[in-house]
Image (spheres, rainbow, N blue to C red):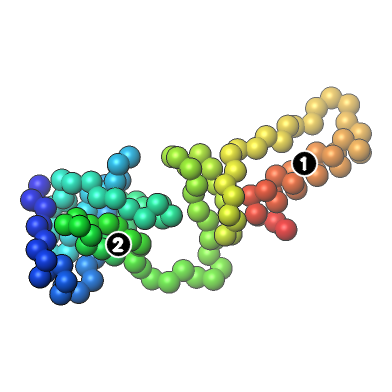
Amino acid sequence: MQQDKTLDKETFDTQPPQFATVAQVYEDGVTLILDGETEPTQKHYQTNTSVVFAAGDRVKILRDSNTYVVEYKVGPPKRSDAVNWSIWGHAGTYLTFFGGSVGRGQLTVPNLSGSVTISDVGNRLNDLLNALRLYNLIK
């Protein structure tokens, strides 16, 4: 493992933007493989909490108070037909799709069984449609 780079005031004020690759994600931050290096850092760096990072992500890093903060992912642009999804909460507990702003836990839509009427089918279909709307999958 490499020693973390020490930043002096002159370097901090004059260096161009820096990039790195996420080596591993931990509860308290991420380890990085800094550009020009082959081994990950030992230190766990803080990240932008609005982004879900994964090992292998190419990221922009910001020097701040003699450390780094991981700002955002860098890569090819997303295609307009690609699913735009975000994970909210801890360990993927909540999901939202297509730019929805409120994460939702798993919803249950029970199966129909026994003697079923048309009204039962209609009610269950409405339950399913409402669940899909809560995840912002349909309007």
Q: Which mark is residue 127?
A: 1
- Disc 1 secondary structure class: helix
Q: Nearer the viewer, mark 2 or mark 1?
A: 2
138 sits to left or right of 93:
right
Residue highlighted by disc 2: 59
Tell me which amino acid carries mark 2: Val
Distance of mark 2 from mark 1, alpha carbons? 41 Å
N-terminal of the pair, mark 2 or mark 1, is: 2
The answer to whether residue 17 is seen in the rendering is yes
Q: Residues within 10 Å of mark 1 (few under 14, many from 20)?
A: some
129 sits to left or right of 93:
right
Q: Which mark is residue 39?
A: none
User: Mark 1 and mark 2 in contact (Cβ < 8 Å)?
Assistant: no
Residue 131 in percent (x, y) is at: 70, 44
- Disc 2 secondary structure class: strand
Residue 130 in percent (x, y) is at: 74, 46
